């Protein structure tokens, strides 16, 4: 089967930590692909534990759900984060045949789409497991060669195509690595998940 969407991810823990509070998920399913960046509050092992818990819940959910919807994803993450220190997250789902899907998130994780124009999606304030305003998911409609990037607040929000001219030439895993290496702040866990349409 020819993949129409390539996935990539990269996580760099805060310097001095071996475990990252940022945890990333990229997953192929029969009808589409899911990518998520989950940022457990704080740093180190406890934050990592929250991130892993939410990643696991999201991974099982998307595998078991015929038609994943953003409300379901955010509700699942919120419920799964209860009793933990909390997290923020950005999630994207894309149907691999139509290149349509959605983006949803809570808190300061972000989404940027590089295509004919560069578009940034930000999410409303909140903490999964504690308080979440009704997320306003956004519809996603991509074209071949578009690149969608999810990243945590450990990555500076300011980079644009001019800062990464070879972005549309690189494989998804290289894009994720470069976004963290070039635009990571260094004072926080930093992570990136990438969907690259072919
Ligand atoms: Mn962070």
Image: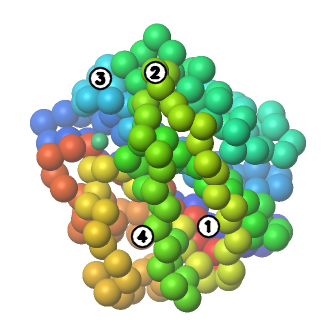
Q: Residue at x 31, y 50 (%)?
A: 153
Relative to the observer, which residue lies in front, 165 or 7?
165
Residue located beneath label 4 in the image:
175
Return the mark for residue 45: 3
Relative to the observer, which residue lies in front, 99 or 180?
99
Residue located beneath label 1 in the image:
6
Q: Secondary structure at mark 2?
A: loop
Q: Secondary structure at mark 1?
A: strand
- Along the polypeptide, which appears first: circle 2 or circle 3? 3
Residue located beneath label 2 in the image:
130
- Along the polypeptide, which appears first: circle 2 or circle 4? 2
Marks 4 and 3, how far apart at CA: 27 Å
Q: Secondary structure at mark 4?
A: helix
For this view, does 130 lie left or right of residue 68?
left
Residue 46 point in image, percent of width and height = 32, 20
Q: Quadrant of ligand 1?
A: top left
Mark 2 burial class by Cα count in 10 Å: few <14, some 14-19, many 20+: some
Mark 1 burial class by Cα count in 10 Å: few <14, some 14-19, many 20+: some
Q: Secondary structure at mark 3?
A: helix
Q: Quadrant of residue 99?
A: bottom right
Name the quadrant of the N terminus: bottom right
- Along the polypeptide, which appears first: circle 2 or circle 1? 1
Marks 2 and 1, how far apart at CA: 34 Å
Residue 122 point in image, percent of width and height = 46, 56
Q: Looking at the image, can residue 87 be seen?
A: yes
């Amino acid at each position: 089967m020819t993949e129409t969407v390539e996935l990539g991810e990269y996580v760099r823990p805060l310097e001095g930590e071996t475990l990252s509070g940022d945890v990333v998920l990229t997953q192929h399913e029969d009808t589409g692909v899911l990518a998520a960046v989950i940022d457990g509050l704080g740093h180190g092992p406890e934050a990592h534990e929250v991130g892993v818990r939410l990643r696991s819940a999201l991974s099982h959910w998307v595998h078991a759900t015929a038609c994943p919807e953003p409300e379901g994803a955010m509700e699942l993450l919120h419920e799964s984060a209860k009793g933990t220190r909390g997290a923020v997250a950005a999630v994207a789902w894309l149907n691999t045949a139509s290149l349509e899907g959605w983006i949803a998130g809570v808190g300061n994780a972000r989404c940027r789409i590089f295509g004919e124009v560069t578009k940034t999606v930000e999410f409303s304030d909140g903490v999964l497991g504690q308080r979440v305003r009704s997320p306003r998911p956004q519809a996603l409609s991509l074209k071949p060669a578009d690149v969608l990037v999810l990243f945590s607040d450990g990555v500076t929000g300011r980079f644009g195509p001019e800062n990464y001219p070879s972005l549309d030439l690189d494989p998804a895993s290289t894009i994720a690595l470069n976004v963290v290496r070039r635009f990571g702040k260094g004072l926080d866990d930093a992570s990136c998940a990438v969907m690259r349409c072919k």
